[in-house]
């Protein structure tokens, strides 16, 4: 009689789960892909924060701001004076008559120095072309005048205010000559030029007051 065959029940091997392990990197990639496929929002949220605009009054922008009497009541006295001065200067700059009068007054105050310079340049001469005289004045280094038109403007004032000392004459060659009267008293001429500024300054002051 043969040995009976034992039936052994074998435990079936466990099959690995079909669910795969996802690393953190895979989750991040999936999230980015979802965001990329998500349609853009049709409406964006805007949060408008109210901003209060406050004017800061200083001496630099005071002249550009409109003020009434109530505003002036709360400002310090020195700032009010600065505002008034800036307003006055702005009005003068916009008035061509005042600007011209101021320039003329400035040139007249320089005439005594120009007078001394011409006397120094023409010690041995009584006649010179105007072009040469202007060049000598500019290149002489005796004053801070470097603009040719300014020199010519001051020479015109000398011809107007001291005709007994300086005059012009047209030469046969076509050159404009400047003639100097050596017989005129230098002290008298210089004193009259120094005094000529006062009527001009009074006139300028009147223009400013009227403006």
Image (spheres, helix red, strand yellow):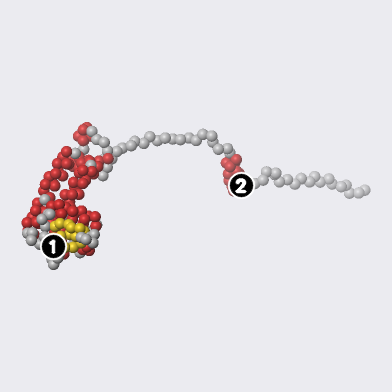
Seen as rendered, the residue at the extreme top is 70
Q: Is residue 132 left or right of residue 24?
A: left
Q: Residue at x 60, y 46 (%)?
A: 29
Quarter-of-image position of residue 115: bottom left
Q: Residue at x 57, y 41 (%)?
A: 35
Q: Is residue 45 above or below residue 7?
A: above
User: Pointer 1: what residue?
Assistant: 119
Quarter-of-image position of residue 155: bottom left
User: Pointer 2: what residue?
Assistant: 26
In x, y percent, where is residue 121? Answer: 16, 64
Quadrant occupied by the C terminus = top left
In x, y percent, where is residue 89? Answer: 21, 43
Q: Decide: marks 2, 1 in contact (CB < 8 A)?
A: no
Compare residues 52 and 103 and report the one nearer the observer. Answer: 103
Q: Residue at x 12, y 45 (%)?
A: 202
The residue mark sitting in front, 2 or 1, is: 1
In x, y percent, where is residue 88? Answer: 20, 41
Residue 79 visible in rendering = no
Q: Is residue 180 above or below residue 65?
A: below
Q: Is residue 112 left or right of residue 63?
A: left
Residues at marks 2 and 1, CA–CA distance in whole angstroms:
99 Å
Compare residues 32 and 200 and report the one nearer the observer. Answer: 200
Residue 63 visible in rendering = yes
Quarter-of-image position of residue 36: top right
Tag 2's secondary structure?
Answer: helix
Seen as rendered, the residue at the extreme bottom is 124
Q: Earlier in the sequence, mark 2 or mark 1?
A: 2
């Amino acid at each position: 009689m043969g040995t009976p065959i034992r039936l052994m029940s074998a435990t079936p091997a466990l099959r690995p789960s079909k669910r795969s392990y996802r690393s953190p990197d895979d989750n991040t990639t999936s999230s980015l892909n979802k965001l990329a496929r998500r349609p853009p929002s049709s409406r964006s949220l805007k949060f408008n924060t109210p901003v209060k605009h406050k004017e800061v009054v200083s001496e630099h922008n005071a002249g550009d701001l409109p003020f009434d009497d109530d505003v002036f009541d709360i400002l310090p006295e020195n700032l009010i004076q600065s505002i008034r001065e800036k307003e006055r200067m702005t009005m003068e700059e916009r008035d061509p008559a005042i600007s011209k009068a101021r320039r003329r007054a400035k040139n007249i105050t320089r005439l005594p120095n120009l007078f001394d310079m011409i006397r120094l340049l023409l010690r041995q001469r009584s006649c010179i072309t105007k072009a040469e005289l202007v060049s000598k004045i500019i290149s002489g280094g005796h004053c801070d005048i470097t603009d040719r038109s300014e020199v010519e403007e001051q020479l015109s004032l000398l011809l107007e205010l001291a005709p007994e000392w300086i005059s012009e004459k047209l030469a046969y060659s076509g050159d404009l000559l400047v003639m100097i009267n050596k017989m005129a008293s230098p002290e008298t001429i210089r004193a009259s030029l120094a005094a000529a500024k006062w009527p001009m300054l009074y006139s300028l002051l009147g223009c400013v007051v009227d403006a």
